[in-house]
Image (spheres, rainbow, N blue to C red):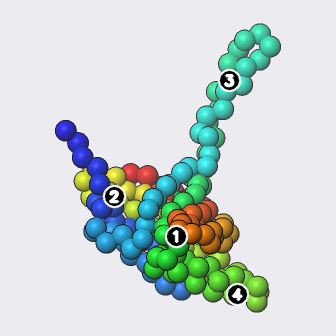
Amino acid sequence: MTLYSFKDLTGAFVHPLGTYIFGGGDQQGFGELQIEMATERTDVAKSADGSIMMSYIAGDNGSITVKAQQTSDVHAFFLNTFNACKTAADSGSVGLWAAGMFTARNLIDGSMHTCTGVTFSKVPPKVYGEKGQDISWMFLCAKIISE
């Protein structure tokens, strides 16, 4: 039998403007973490006579989506870090824009993701309604290593 628990996930978002560590059962409002590669590694082309040509496509870029409660510390951290990066970039200093690093590790199966060149996609929509909502922060990554 195998068992999965989100509480077995640990990791960190590391940026020159601050670090946010999560895990060990203390997820601070996290609801979901998704890491996705952007590049389809294989292309198949078929000619008119039915011959097949396979092509390998390089690329380690991708994205991370963090779903968090709108009242969570992690949402506040991401919003503050985004605003600081945007202010710097709007002032002509873009060096911080893609300076993030993100790691995630499952303590049970040992799987790990290391993402570098991490940058914010945009500030996500925020719903104001009868009940609190989750907010989905999306990050673009220059390189993702999955182990």
The CA span between labels 1 and 4 is: 28 Å
Considering the image in quadrants, where does the N terminus appear? top left
Compare residues 46 and 32 and report the one nearer the observer.
Answer: 32
The circle drawn on residue 87 is 4
Mark 1, other Cα within 10 Å: few <14 / some 14–19 / many ≥20:
few
Image coordinates for residue 30, horizontal then vertical, percent: 43, 67
Q: Which numbered disc, 1 or 3, marks the residue that appears first in the sequence?
A: 3
> Which kind of residue does numbered mark 3 sit on?
Met
- Pair 2/1: label in front: 1
Label 3 neighbour load within 10 Å: few <14, some 14-19, many 20+:
few
Secondary structure beneath dot 2 equals helix
SS category of the residue bearing label 3: strand
Mark 1 and mark 3 in contact? Answer it, CB < 8 Å.
Answer: no
For label 1, the residue is 132
Amino acid bearing label 4: Thr
Q: Are marks 4 and 3 in contact (CB under 8 Å)?
A: no
Q: Which quadrant holds residue 48?
A: top right
Tell me the CA gap for discs 4 and 2: 34 Å
Q: Which mark is residue 53?
A: 3
Picture residue at 66% right of the left edge, 32% below the top: 43
Single out the residue that lies furthest toward the left. 1
Where is residue 38 drawn, in percent x and y? 61, 49
